[in-house]
Image (cartoon, helix red, strand yellow):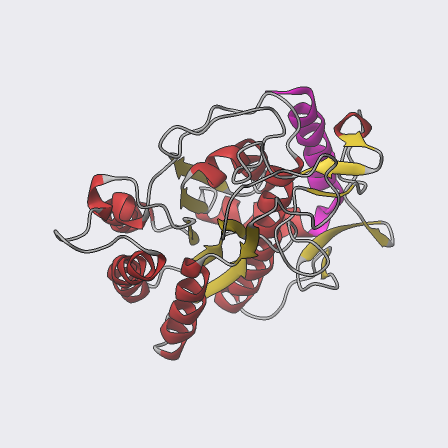
Amino acid sequence: MGHGVKALTVWLAVSLLSVGVAVGVGTARADAESVRPTVLVFGDSLVWEAEPYLSSFLVSDHDVRVFAVGGTAICDYADDVVRRSAELHPRMVVLAFSGNSLTTCMLPPPGTPVDQRWIATKYQRDLDGIVGPLGRMGVSMTLVGAPPRLERVGDPVVRPTVWTVGAVPSNMVSVETNVNSVYESTAARARALGFDVGYVDGGRRLKSPSGGWTKVLPCTVIDPGSACDAGLVTVRAFDLVHFCPEVMVATEGVVQRCTVYSGGAVRYALAIDSYLRNRIETSADAVHGGSSSTDWTIDADGLTVPVVGEVGCFVVRD
């Protein structure tokens, strides 16, 4: 674990103590049930990168179990998701896959081109095979959209000499991942059937002001000073896909664990965590009756942030 990860983990421990009412409610419920409620998270390399941060967020009042391998797709986990949900009765199941088509279960019929349209169709079919069984079990689900990606539109591809917010290499354009629309529409259809399924854009804190891909973002109070250069923090990796600011090469979608602070992984994890906290608290209130007091509030972009005194902030110190 890198210095930045340790710093954030220490902050998380302090922060969770500061939100006493919310943690107290969660602890009381866990004591009543004699076990902490379980959150299952399934994903690919982006979740793998975010796991050191994501596992810390709910760790005091939830049993967070992360299952993530680079290069995988929904179909690699379909049976496991249903089986573990039936065994563990989790409070929430999270699916966060970014559209890989590298594993055996993603092989198309002979003669079928593997393009974004085919991948989206396959993800839709595999997702339906999970949402239905979990919905009938009464399990709540969250589907996580991927951050924007870059698509080549010509040659040569030349990277900027100096990265600025929103800059992209020449002959490349920022696009939304096709599976995001699959997740969002699936969540809407599932809710219409009475299933508790939500959607969150996992890349919402990783976008430029115009809403597209960016390699760097302005540093904020969540970033240690050592991660900032001229007021900017790197949020996408050298391969322009992953998060770690170190020079990393992905092999079949698999990357090594980052040994330094990763601003991109933190932002991805925060987008997921803040949405989950809001959903879990709301769901728990509905189950236990009435509404409970909470030290979490909705911020400007619809996510929840911890309130410290009268100011909502994330603080990380070197």
Residue at 60 percent across and 59 percent down: it is 278
Q: Which residues are magenta?
A: 1-21
What secondary structure characterizes most of the magenta part? helix
Camera-side residue of 87 and 163: 163
How many marks on residues?
0
- Asked whether residue 162 is in view, the answer is yes
Relative to 10, residue 278 above or below: below
> Quick check: is 163 in the magenta stretch?
no
Residue extending furthest toward the bottom: 192
- Of the 4 image quadrants, the one containing the N terminus is top right
Residue 26 point in image, percent of width and height: 58, 49
Residue extending furthest toward the left: 110
- Of the 4 image quadrants, the one containing the C terminus is top right
Quarter of the image where one finds residue 194: bottom left
Residue 47 point in image, percent of width and height: 48, 40
- Asked whether residue 147 is in view, the answer is no
Residue 75 point in image, percent of width and height: 26, 49
Residue 293 point in image, percent of width and height: 70, 61
Relative to 220, residue 284 above or below: below
Relative to 287, 278 lies left or right: right
Residue at 47 percent across and 23 percent down: it is 256
Camera-side residue of 118 and 18: 118
Camera-side residue of 265 and 32: 265
Residue extending furthest toward the front: 155
> Quick check: is 11 in the magenta stretch?
yes
Quarter of the image where one finds residue 296: bottom right
Relative to 201, 11 lies left or right: right
Residue at 24 percent across and 47 percent down: it is 106
